[in-house]
Amino acid sequence: MNYSDIEKLLGDEAKPLFTHVCRTVSKEALHLPSPIWIDSIFAQSDRNIRTLRSLAALFGHGRLANTGYLSILPVDQGIEHSAGASFALNPEYFDPENILKLAIEGGCNAVATTLGVLGIVARKYAHKIPLILKINHNELLSYPNAYDQVLFASVKQAHEMGAVAVGATIYFGSEESRRQIVEVSHAFEMAHELGMATILWCYLRNSAFKIDKVDYHESADLTGQANHLGVTIEADIIKQKLPVNNGGFKALKFGKMSEKMYTSLCSDHPIDLTRYQVVNNYMGRIGLINSGGPSGKDDLAEAAKTAVINKRAGGMGLISGRKAFQRPMKDGVKLLHTIQDVYLCKEIGVA
């Protein structure tokens, strides 16, 4: 898919996305994804040589290999959303091998999923596609549900099966968040010691973040701060939902803020909202990958739109699951390729 195809797919939304110029934090101030990303960022860090090798494997695989961008297939919804609800549309994905096949056919850099899924096929696939073991989950069978991320796997298990990275979620803002921060920080320390990269799902979770029927769980200021906490515990890559609004701190009347967060550092344009997330990732030194969101009616266009926003904001790629696996495999492959085509398209630059 070339530039004109992507433009046609986006329809009326193409022009405001492609012509936008960011007048908040300039692209020159950012550390942008590139083929020499590992050399320019992590070779100067405290990550050991084995972790650099794992990062190289992650960035060197799939259709986006050696571009500095990432396309990852994440499938942990069998735990997070129940297996039946997640795989009813395509029962073939109850079989873990088909998850790996989709990631490979879809040209992804890596697949991120559970201990059970990776463990049952690890010997067959660990050398064919980089594996990311998601070590904690929120399961929905405990009643009433507490919405808490608990450890399902260990870093040692990830290492033993040949994973190049571990992934984890922290529900920032929740009552359990401080325990989760400690658990994940210790896990990331061990992962780096063993030579694996670290990816953090920096999600917000607190009913108080919904005020006057406005949901601020995906506001730029709150998600940006969650990102900043995530990079503090040495996540190598941050996964975050695309911001849809701003002003969470103002509405909550909680925490500390500066008016410049909403003026000189951000605007209401989706690219600028996402750039604020990138800024909180140490000015882009830690890559931002946005989630693809739930499956819906216009998934192909929505996936392309999210990719354009992420790329033009200075982000590093997408981690898209439900949009890909909740449809026939050939259509899932097409969707993943469409996302990747945005990052391969040289006409789509950073705003």
Image (spheres, grey):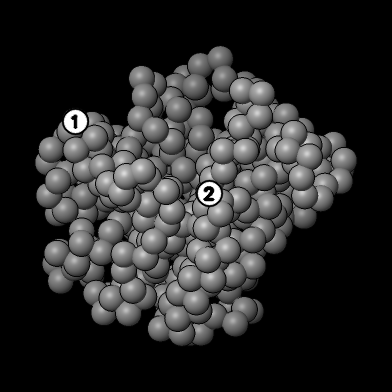
Considering the numbered disc 2 on the image, is that residue within a helix, a strand or a loop?
strand
In this picture, residue 181 sits left or right of residue 326: right
Q: Quadrant for the N terminus, please.
A: top left
Can you identify the residue that label 1 sits on? Answer: 89
> Pointer 2 and pointer 1: residues touching (CB < 8 Å)?
no
The residue depicted at 59 percent of the width and 70 percent of the height is 233
Q: Is residue 108 visible?
A: no
The residue depicted at 31 percent of the width and 64 percent of the height is 152
Q: Position of residue 39 (x, y in %)?
A: 57, 73
Q: Quadrant for the C terminus, please.
A: top right
The residue depicted at 43 percent of the width and 48 percent of the height is 147
Residue 203, labelled with which disc?
A: 2
In this picture, residue 161 sits left or right of residue 173: left
Badge count: 2
Residue 185, labelled with which disc?
A: none
Q: Residues within 10 Å of mark 1 (few under 14, many from 20)?
A: few
